[in-house]
Amino acid sequence: MSGVGAERTAAIAAKVEAFVRDVVIPYEKDPRRDHHNCPTEELIEELKALAREAGVLTPHILANGSHLNQRETAQVLIRTGLSPLGPLACNTAAPDEGNMYLLGKVGSAEIKRRFLDPLVSGSGRSCFFMTEPASLQGAGSDPSMMITTCRRDGNHWVVNGKKAFSTGAQGAKVGIVMARSEEDDSKGGACMFLVDLPDPAIIVTHVPNTIDNSMPGGHCEVTIDNLRIPADQMLGNAGEGFTYAQVRLSPARLSHCMRWLGACRRAHEIATDYANRRIAFGKTLIDHEGVGFMLAENMIDLKQAELMIDWCADVLDTGALGTVESSMAKVAVSEALMRVADRCVQVMGGSGVTDHTVVEQVFREIRAFRIYDGPTEVHKWSLAKKIKRDWKAAQAGAPR
């Protein structure tokens, strides 16, 4: 991906950062929140309207439909992440950003018109129905365990099953549903479908309270009961859904890293300001080595996270799937940011565990991020399998 160039990217990123800092951050204390303290649709729509007016709505997709490359996208999404509300305001939040990327890459012209255009314009949110309840031994980190099924019925497909952690299902306008085909020509393969939401056949049965609260619409459990979908709303071909999921997977992992890097930069700024103002034992906290060293370690971890993101983005910009590289980046960045967020809380002491600043929320959100798009342990296991494969290949080719 060629992108738009460093100068134009820098201008977009600067405009986004100014908007998030000057306009969005003051909304962090806005009381319009749901029962789980997530921002309400009313608040999100107000923020989107301000972003549209400021020219920073969906800033990673240009007016002509072209997309910033991954390295350029990183510069922009890091800035939207400076506030938990920033991605919602600028329309760069998960799962919408990843769904837009997928539909832009794989969707037909009609699917783009019906389902992608509303997402890009910010007129609706989306949901990706893939994960299934652990109580049913459904698909989670192992997508091959998918138990939701689909079968042909004339010019429709009929889907039945249950899904869990369907982020944003409540209030979403667009859904992407994954199911396992029961048809002979694609039996066992995954299929992806686009659906308009709400649909009476997709029933939200439970919205759990979770450690994070930056994503509206909840992490829902749903029952899919004889959902009928026109055949032309299948994304690509029957049985190839896992292939399309790979298209979305690495960029979506990386964009999580981008947004949460922005959040941790902000938390570090707040902790640094606190440490330079708060006096204890006769001097400012930053002059105590225990505190100063924690902030120094933050500085190192933040830079390493930035470089890992840039490295993986560069690989993706070559057109490679970047599965290995994105696993490495997801592990390195999520673990580094967890250390950063934890130190910020520690530096601020009692103030760090209150909602007086956004630091406490960032800590909770980063803890959840270590699980999003594959827990650290799954990625390490996958990397270990690659190490073993590479070793075997090297042994097979070694002189005897």
Image (cartoon, rainbow, N blue to C red):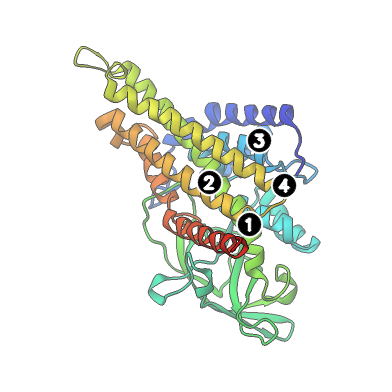
Sequence-first tag of 1 and 3: 3
Examine the image and state in which quarter residue 95 appears: bottom right
The answer to the question of whether label 2 and label 3 lie on touching residues, with beta carbons closer than 8 A, is no
Q: Residues within 10 Å of mark 3 (few under 14, many from 20)?
A: many
Name the mark nearer the viewer: 4 or 3: 4
Label 4: which residue? Answer: 318
Name the mark nearer the viewer: 4 or 1: 4
Question: Is residue 125 at least partly visible in the picture?
Answer: no
How far across and down, in percent of the image, does residue 169 sit? 52, 61
Label 1: which residue? Answer: 248
Q: Residues within 10 Å of mark 1 (few under 14, many from 20)?
A: many
Sequence-first tag of 4 and 1: 1
Work out whether residue 375 or residue 205 is closer to the camera in this orientation and state it.
375
Q: Is residue 320 left or right of residue 29?
A: right
173 up-or-down from 57: above or below: below
For badge 3, the amino acid type reads: Val
How far across and down, in percent of the image, does residue 40 sit? 48, 48
Label 3: which residue? Answer: 56
CA gap between label 4 and label 3 equals 27 Å
Q: Secondary structure at mark 4?
A: loop
